[in-house]
Image (cartoon, helix red, strand yellow):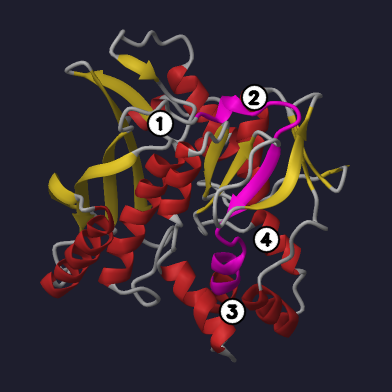
């Protein structure tokens, strides 16, 4: 009897859900003194040689996060770095270096892995960072695992737990484009306009506004998060970590023109993509209402007291964003 069969009692990973599995893995574990911040935010913070290092890890798995008939190796490499770099920047940390793990079938063309490497280096180069190591193993599907390391440059980390009642909720970057691009790819619909082409391009290679996230850190953002699973879902993490209510005001902003164009052409409510679409890697943050927002940031709501939740126009709104096991 296999070990997996021996443990087949109780819920499966899908049934339990991503965050329950993480909680089961971390509950009751004692972190050493060198771990300044453990699981529960966009990245961990550890003390190494007296300094604070910010670290995170994320993976891209073929058929789940990308398809090679939709995305080139270069696209996949850039996306793998972008989603990890965005987590570091959401903490206010400047990316320094990346470690790459690659699993792939032995028949994978070397030209693909060359293109993947070029994409990894291209996105890392946006920070003057590099690829400092990794591992290559045989696997059934192509899997790219990235460990990212960053530094706070003397600033305090921006945590999900810092939001306060009265704060302004603001966004930088756009949400909904990646979901619109995925809709076009899954439906097999050729883009009918430049709007569709842009949404597909953003799905293949996200465009996180890294500099704006770091500027928010320098400007005193109280909490911040990378929008990877959907605006409602990710703001829910801030609401729970800070024990506050986040109330979004749809009158304060509107879907971008590209999302409006694709949604209109396909009979989709654009707000469904804006509020619940994943993998745009915009940033949301909360700020002192007395201070001006950093350049590029725009107000989308406010923080109030109450039981932790996210509202839209004062009404309860269930998040239905992207999940690892959906």
Question: CA gap, disc 3 to disc 1?
Answer: 37 Å
- Which mark is nearer the camera, 4 or 2? 2
Q: Is residue 160 left or right of residue 166?
A: left
Question: Badge 1 local density, few (<14 within 10 Å), some, or many (20+)?
Answer: few
- Quadrant of the image occupied by residue 66: bottom left
Q: Which residue is mark 1?
A: 5
Q: From the image, which quarter does the N terminus lie in?
A: top left
Question: Badge 3 local density, few (<14 within 10 Å), some, or many (20+)?
Answer: few
Q: x, y percentage for residue 25?
A: 44, 22
Q: Which residue is mark 2?
A: 242
Q: x, y percentage for residue 323?
A: 56, 47
Question: CA gap, disc 1 to disc 2?
Answer: 40 Å
Residues marked 3 and 2 touching at CB (< 8 Å): no
Q: Which residue is mark 3?
A: 187
Q: Which residues make up the magenta segment?
A: 159-181
User: How many numbered badges does the structure rendering display?
Assistant: 4
Q: Which residue is mark 4?
A: 274
- Which mark is nearer the camera, 3 or 4? 4
Q: Residue at x 42, y 69 (%)?
A: 204
Residues marked 3 and 4 touching at CB (< 8 Å): no
Question: CA gap, disc 3 to disc 4?
Answer: 19 Å
- Which mark is nearer the camera, 3 or 2? 2
Q: Is residue 213 above or below residue 173?
A: above
Instruction: Please state which of residues 246 and 112 is positioned toward the viewer in this rendering.
Output: 246
Question: CA gap, disc 4 to disc 2?
Answer: 23 Å
Q: Is residue 4 left or right of residue 161?
A: left
Q: Residue at x 48, y 14 (%)?
A: 27
């Amino acid at each position: 009897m296999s070990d997996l069969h021996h443990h087949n009692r109780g819920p499966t990973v899908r049934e339990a859900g991503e965050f329950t599995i993480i909680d089961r893995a971390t509950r009751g574990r004692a972190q050493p003194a060198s771990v300044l911040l453990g699981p529960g935010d966009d990245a961990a913070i550890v003390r190494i040689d007296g300094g604070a290092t910010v670290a995170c890890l994320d993976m891209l798995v073929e058929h789940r996060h990308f398809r090679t008939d939709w995305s080139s190796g270069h696209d996949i490499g850039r996306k793998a770095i972008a989603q990890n770099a965005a987590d570091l920047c959401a903490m206010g940390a400047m990316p320094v270096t990346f470690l790459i793990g690659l699993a792939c079938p032995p028949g994978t063309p070397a030209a693909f892995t060359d293109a993947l490497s070029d994409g990894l280096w291209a996105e890392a180069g946006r920070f003057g960072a590099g690829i400092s190591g990794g591992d290559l193993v045989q696997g059934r599907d192509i899997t790219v695992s990235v460990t990212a390391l960053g530094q706070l440059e003397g600033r305090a980390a921006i945590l999900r737990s810092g939001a306060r009642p009265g704060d302004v909720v603001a966004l930088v970057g756009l949400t909904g484009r990646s979901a619109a691009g995925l809709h076009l790819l899954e439906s097999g619909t050729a883009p009918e306009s430049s709007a569709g082409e842009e949404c597909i391009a953003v799905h293949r290679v996200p465009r996180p506004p890294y500099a704006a996230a770091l500027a928010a850190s320098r400007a005193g953002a109280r909490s911040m998060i990378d929008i990877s699973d959907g605006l409602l879902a990710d703001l829910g993490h801030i609401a729970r970590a800070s024990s506050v209510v986040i109330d979004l005001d749809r009158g304060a902003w509107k879907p971008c023109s590209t999302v409006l164009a694709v949604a209109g052409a396909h009979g989709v409510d654009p707000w469904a993509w804006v509020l619940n679409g994943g993998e745009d890697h915009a940033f949301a943050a909360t700020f002192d209402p007395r201070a001006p927002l950093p350049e590029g940031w725009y107000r989308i709501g406010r923080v109030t007291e109450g039981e932790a939740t996210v509202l839209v126009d004062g009404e309860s709104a269930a998040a239905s964003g992207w999940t690892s096991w959906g």
